[in-house]
Amino acid sequence: MVKVRNSDGPIVVKETFFQKNFRRERKLNRSRAGNVLLFVFMGLCGAFMVMPLIIVVNNALKPLDEIFQFPPRIFVRNPTTENFTDLFISMSETWVPLSRYILNSAVIMVFSVFGHVIVASLAAYPLAKHKFPGKKLLFSLVILSLMFTWQVTQIPNYVIISFLGINNTYLALIIPAWGYGIGLYLMKQFMEQIPDSLIESARIDGAGEFRAFWRIIMPNVKPAWLTLMIFQFNLMWGNTGYLFLRSEELKPLQFAMQHIAAGGPRRAGEAMAVLFVLAAIPITFFLVCQSSILETMTTSGIKE
Amino acid sequence: MVKQKNDAPSLGSIIAKNKVSYMMMAPYFLIFTTFTILPVAASLFISLTYFNMLEAPQFIGWANYLKLLLEDDIFMIALKNTMILAIITGPLSYVLCLLFAWIINEFKGRLRAFLTLVFYAPSISGQVFFIWTIIFTGDRYGILNGFLLRWGFMDEPVLWMRDAKYILPFLIVVQLWLSLGTGFLAFIAGLQTIDKSLYEAAAIDGIRNRWQELWFVTLPAMKPQLMFGAVMQITASFAIADISLWLAGDPPGSPVSVNYSGSTIVTHLIDNGTIRFEMGYASAIATVLFILMVGTNRLVQRLLRRVGN
């Protein structure tokens, strides 16, 4: 491996021509029997994991009579997009236009996800790589906070948010999300693995700490912050903000859709479509992030 | 006046020396303190009071804790259920997370992305577990009943979620399905950052098979992720509530199930906090759960330090 420093870019690890083109095909330490055993086991578990999702997809495509059919079937016979068009009609008839709900969700998701990744990574770097008094205490506070039940902190939280005057605004959801514990913990764990020599060489080159963070640390823990984006997206997707967002025109899409899904048997078809949409959006986001993680596979791990 | 010479540096000089570190952490810890530390501190205080959310809290000392630990029979049921759920699903799901992540790491490209999706998808949307209510529906329209009837295993439908003996096992199944989330994805990312030349070096050093490679090379190289996964697993498996509320709850969404057979510590907390308006008591339950998790975490982190030795 050769370390190359681009004129203005990060230090990149490049494979030599030989390594790139003559990689050994057979993997080390892998027996065929072991492969078969593990993959069969994983196939069985995979079928179990994916089954409810298959039901979600099929139910969303079922016409109403098939949803209430006896005996029930998993797979749809006469697939229809009726449920989705019904859902779309219901959503367009609401007092707040559909586009407003989508905008609300987008604003909340974008700011809470990116904000959290940046704020938490920035704090994780000194905790992983600097020496200063209070380091252990701060870090253990964050871990301990993960173990406290959020249900009982809601009332104090409500008081604080009202006191700050951000109640019934997007900020009531976005700002607290920046301080979640999971991001700091995850980023710190990954940054710990970066060899000190890498940061040293950046310092010798005259990079300040902020520059080293942005140019060396963050590119090297790309899988970590992409993973964190997935976590944070899911957390915020489940957070409909019912406690803080009272104005209907501020509520996110998930909230509006759950209301439609709760419409009883008459809306059973639409409810299935809602279940599908509510799962499809985070899954799409997940696939985008995951494929970016795969791109980083070409550089093989963190190197000295 | 003679200036006193201090061996220990003053607070000001400590801050000045580590200015950059503190500056980088300032935004996060400011928000963290405001929205996490303060509320937790407040709830610790509330646990020592009688607080019905309408009147100001009244200080009553340890009364909530005494009642909780000595008199509350339902808490004991909830504690027992939580321990059963946590002891079965916690370690099992942790090992499965690791195993699946490790196997998936052998694949490349699209297949890898697809397999990751298959195992992570259940935890992707907090809503999809509702599909289990359709599977477990107690009448003939329930998917599980429908198939068991059609294949002739039974003659009449079973009210799965209204029968105390089925509730806990079924919750375990759903929790296992749901719990391959945070840890799994962190492991997948962790495996990817391992320096591949370590494996070649290990092969030269005489590592014979994949299991030795896993134990002596892979796991030690991803210890930070293992610890992260453990904390996430502990917090998830001790705080099981949603699936109990929506699958076992009667009516769905309520914290009360048949004979409290689906009650967990957190559903008991919700029962007292949001239904009975006993916020002081609910906070005391939260504190007990917190201590339980911290203790378990200590134990698990100690075990994890032995990995690879």
Image: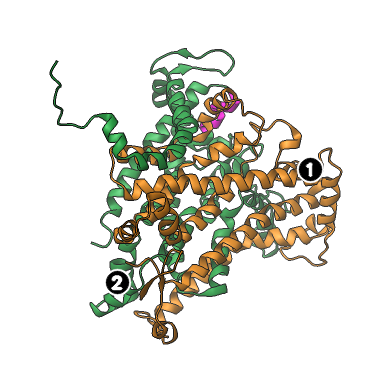
Chain colours: A orange, B green
Determine which quarter of the picture holds residue B64.
Answer: top left
Chain bearing mark 1: A
Tag 1 residue: A264
The residue tagged with tag 1: helix, strand or loop?
Answer: loop
Q: Name the mark on residue B212.
A: 2
Q: Is residue B66 magenta?
A: no
Residue at point 80% right, 46% down?
Answer: A98
Q: Position of residue A266 (x, y in %)?
A: 84, 46
- The alpha-carbon separation of the residues under discs 1 and 2 comes to 55 Å
> Can the viewer see residue A75?
yes
In the rendered image, which quarter contains the N terminus of chain A? bottom left
The residue tagged with tag 2: helix, strand or loop?
Answer: helix
- Amino acid carrying label 2: it is Gln
> Residue B87 or A103: which is nearer the viewer?
A103
Magenta stretch, overall SS: helix
Q: Position of residue A123 (x, y in %)?
A: 42, 44
Tag in front: 1 or 2: 2
- Amino acid carrying label 1: it is Gly
Q: Which residues are magenta?
A: B268-276
